[in-house]
Image: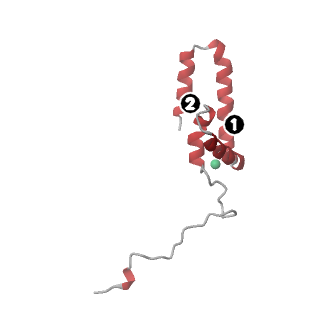
């Protein structure tokens, strides 16, 4: 009745180390989805120092995320500048909400 070929515990897949220089592991801590998810909090200044430096470090080493950040930062800048004088705060808030909901 013993069938050693169907043993459930096959320890032949060690976890990838992911150390420096690991293949294709440019984005590590935090990974891209984390970074993007927190971009808005970052831009709003809602992150604590530790979190901010993590995101910042990621942006420095990950150009796709940096571009996304740059775009959002620019957009916010434009909204903040243009809307301050011309657009009611209510509308401005709705725009920011719409941006925040994206993705
Ligand atoms: Zn990234």
Q: Which of 47 and 40 is in front in this view?
A: 47
Q: Nearer the viewer, residue 9 or 72?
A: 9
Q: Position of residue 85 (x, y in %)?
A: 66, 13
Count of labels in the image: 2
Q: Position of residue 72 (x, y in %)?
A: 64, 33
- Name the residue beneath numbered marker 2: 99
Which image quadrant for residue 16? Answer: bottom right
Q: Tell me: residue 63, above or below residue 43.
A: below
Q: Position of residue 32 (x, y in %)?
A: 60, 48
- Name the residue beneath numbered marker 1: 70
**Secondary structure found at label 1:** helix
- Rounded to the nearest angstrom, the CA distance separating label 2 from label 1 is 14 Å
Q: Tell me: residue 12, above or below residue 32.
A: below
Q: Residues within 10 Å of mark 1 (few under 14, many from 20)?
A: some
Q: Is residue 57 left or right of residue 96?
A: right
Q: How crowded is mark 2: few (under 14 residues within 10 Å), some or many (20 or more)?
A: some
Which image quadrant for residue 43? Answer: top right
Q: Which residue extends farthest left?
A: 1
Establish whether ligand 1 lies closer than 8 Å to the Cβ of label 2: no
Q: Which residue extends farthest bottom?
A: 1
Quarter of the picture containing the N terminus is bottom left
Q: Which mark is residue 62?
A: none
Which image quadrant for residue 81? Answer: top right
Q: Tell me: residue 6, above or below residue 28.
A: below
Q: Earlier in the sequence, mark 2 or mark 1?
A: 1
Q: How is the image coloured?
A: secondary structure
Q: Is there CB contact under 8 Å for labels 2 and 1?
A: no
Q: Tell me: residue 11, above or below residue 94.
A: below
**Residue at image x 53%, y 28%?**
98
């Amino acid at each position: 009745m013993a069938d050693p070929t169907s043993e459930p515990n096959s320890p032949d897949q060690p976890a990838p180390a992911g150390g420096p220089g690991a293949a294709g592991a440019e984005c590590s801590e935090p990974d891209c989805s984390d970074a993007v998810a927190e971009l808005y909090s970052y831009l709003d200044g809602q992150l604590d120092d530790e979190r901010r430096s993590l995101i910042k470090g990621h942006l420095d080493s990950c150009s796709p995320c940096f571009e996304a950040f740059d775009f959002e930062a620019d957009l916010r800048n434009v909204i903040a500048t243009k809307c301050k004088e011309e657009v009611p705060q209510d509308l401005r808030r709705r725009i920011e909400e719409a941006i925040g909901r994206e993705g």
